[in-house]
Amino acid sequence: MNKIDVNPVIVKESLGDKLSKEKHVWDEYLEAKRDKPERQVLAVGLGHRFHEGPWLFHDLSFRLEPGEIVGICGPSGSGKSTLLSLIAGFEDPTSGSVQRFGINRICWVFQNPHGMPRRTAIDHVTQPLLGQGMNRVQAESQALAIMEDFHLIDVCARDFKELSGGEAQRLMLARAVASRPDLLLVDEPTAQLDQLTAADVDRTLAGIAQADCIVAVATHDPNTRSACTRVIDLARHRNTEKQ
């Protein structure tokens, strides 16, 4: 949202004029906020199924905002990844609506990471930083700082094809952080990680959320679920008899 100056300089005005002018500016500010809502995702009456099959979920309403990690939980086949796709706008819901405000850049970290086999790990993180206008030295310095948060310093010079599954998944998370998204969607971020590394990843995701980013995480991991600010449990919104 564009910032509006709500503190105009007032010189030699009467108290009444000052109050009137300040009220006018404040009214303009509130009107601008109404016209341009804060960054958020708003879902109302959301439901989805494939073709004429059973409903994955229905009557699901929620709001996603920066500053929190929202966990999307439920048994296998309950539609966790599908809900991420609906939130991103990659698919249209069968019923209900999803609206996105103030979101220009979306990053999705898949459960099965995909990278460039013959490019180094640090290249993957440096690339989006170069795209933001940094020079090579600045980008590599920032990339190393991000990779350290994900325990990737020791593999920064390795090609992607040489990384383990857990390392590759953490690398894609690091790349997403470097992209500075408005909306970050993560599918099972700790599925291939040991408990200590998973806890660090959860803390890093919390830090991303505090940096004005909306974070939604699909997970089976009870520890990741506990680390979330709140949880959307799809098991509570499943009804195969809905018409």
Image (cartoon, rainbow, N blue to C red):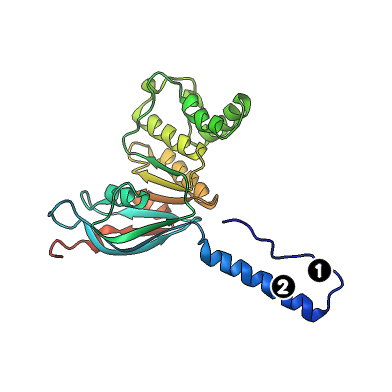
Q: Is residue 95 visible?
A: yes
Mark 1: give few (<14), some (14-19) or many (20+) Cα within 10 Å.
Answer: few
Q: Which is nearer the eye, 200 or 185?
A: 185
- Say if 18 sits above or below 76 in the image: below
Residue 60 drawn at (x, y percent)? 29, 63
Residue 200 drawn at (x, y percent)? 47, 42
Q: Which residue is mark 1?
A: 10
Q: Is residue 120 left or right of residue 73?
A: right
Residue under the point 40% across and 55% down:
70
Q: Is residue 219 visible?
A: no
Q: Which is nearer the eye, 179 or 10?
A: 10
Q: Which residue is mark 2?
A: 22
Q: Is residue 35 left or right of residue 41?
A: right
Q: Which is nearer the eye, 86 or 158?
A: 86
- Say if 193 sits above or below 223 in the image: above
| Amino acid, disc 2 | Glu
Q: How many marks?
A: 2
Q: Which is nearer the eye, 215 or 1?
A: 1
Residue under the point 33% across and 36% down:
192
Q: Earlier in the sequence, mark 1 or mark 2?
A: 1
User: Looking at the image, which residue sits at the far right?
Assistant: 12
Q: Is residue 196 left or right of residue 24?
A: left
User: Looking at the image, which residue sits at the far bottom?
Assistant: 16
Q: Provide the secondary structure element on which disc 1 rests.
A: loop
Residue under the point 62% across and 68% down:
28
Mark 1–mark 2 Cα distance, whole angstroms, equals 9 Å
Residue 184 drawn at (x, y percent)? 43, 46
Q: Which of the 4 image quarters holds residue 239? A: bottom left
Q: Circles 1 and 2: CB distance less than 8 Å?
A: yes
Residue 176 drawn at (x, y percent)? 46, 38
